[in-house]
Image (cartoon, rainbow, N blue to C red):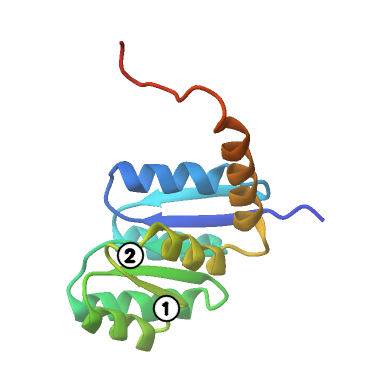
Amino acid sequence: MEQHLRGMIIAKPGRIRECVHAMLASLSGVESVELIEDPEAALKFIAKSSPNFVLFGLQLPNPQFQSFLRELKLKSPETKTLVIVDNIVQQQSAKVAGADEVLLQGATAEKFIDALSKIVPSNLLKEHLAECAEAKKSSESEEPLHLTRR
């Protein structure tokens, strides 16, 4: 059965946000991944569309941050969330407010992918990463790609 998953990334524009968006949007079974910067707009979207997963990377003051997560879970309790925080106090607050996965800013790529794979339903992400690893192995014997002129 073909999955039609919807996701959302709530974060300020930047290279990492764009890369994560491209990776998630390329997964088979993922119908759409919205990019939203504003928590109010995100809550409206969540109420309307109930995404399957949300990646939250905005830095908000603690009371506003907890309130946002609680409201997200009230509007769409089945939505899985990964929250990236700056410190241990925010990490604990995110867990109390109902976040499914919480990472400290600066976590390793391995921890990030592990947490992300827990909120993206089924094995879509793991399958995609396995394909990427296999492609990397087969291309390691080839000449490396140079992005600058020689």
- One can see residue 50 in this view: no
Position of residue 40 relative to residue 4, above or below, is below
- Mark drawn on residue 99: 1
In the image shown, does 129 or 93 lie closer to the viewer?
A: 129
Residue positioned 46% across, 25% down in the render: 144
Residue positioned 53% across, 78% down in the render: 77
Residue at far left of view: 61
Disc 2 residue type (three-letter)? Ala
Q: Which part of the image, by quadrant, shows the N terminus?
A: bottom right
Q: Secondary structure at mark 2?
A: loop
Disc 1 residue type (three-letter)? Ala
- Which corner quadrant of the image does residue 102 belong to? bottom left
In the image shown, does 130 or 84 lie closer to the viewer?
A: 130
Q: Position of residue 114 (x, y in %)?
A: 50, 65
Q: Position of residue 31 (x, y in %)?
A: 62, 47
Position of residue 66 relative to residue 35, above or below, is below
Residue at far right of view: 1
Residue positioned 29% across, 84% down in the render: 93
Residue 48 relative to residue 84: left or right: right
Q: Position of residue 126 (x, y in %)?
A: 62, 57
Tag in front: 2 or 1: 2
Residue at far top of view: 150
Residue 22 relative to residue 97: left or right: right
Q: Residues within 10 Å of mark 2 (few under 14, many from 20)?
A: few
- Mark drawn on residue 141: none
Identify the residue under disc 2: 107
- Which corner quadrant of the image does residue 69 belong to? bottom left
- One can see residue 37 in this view: yes
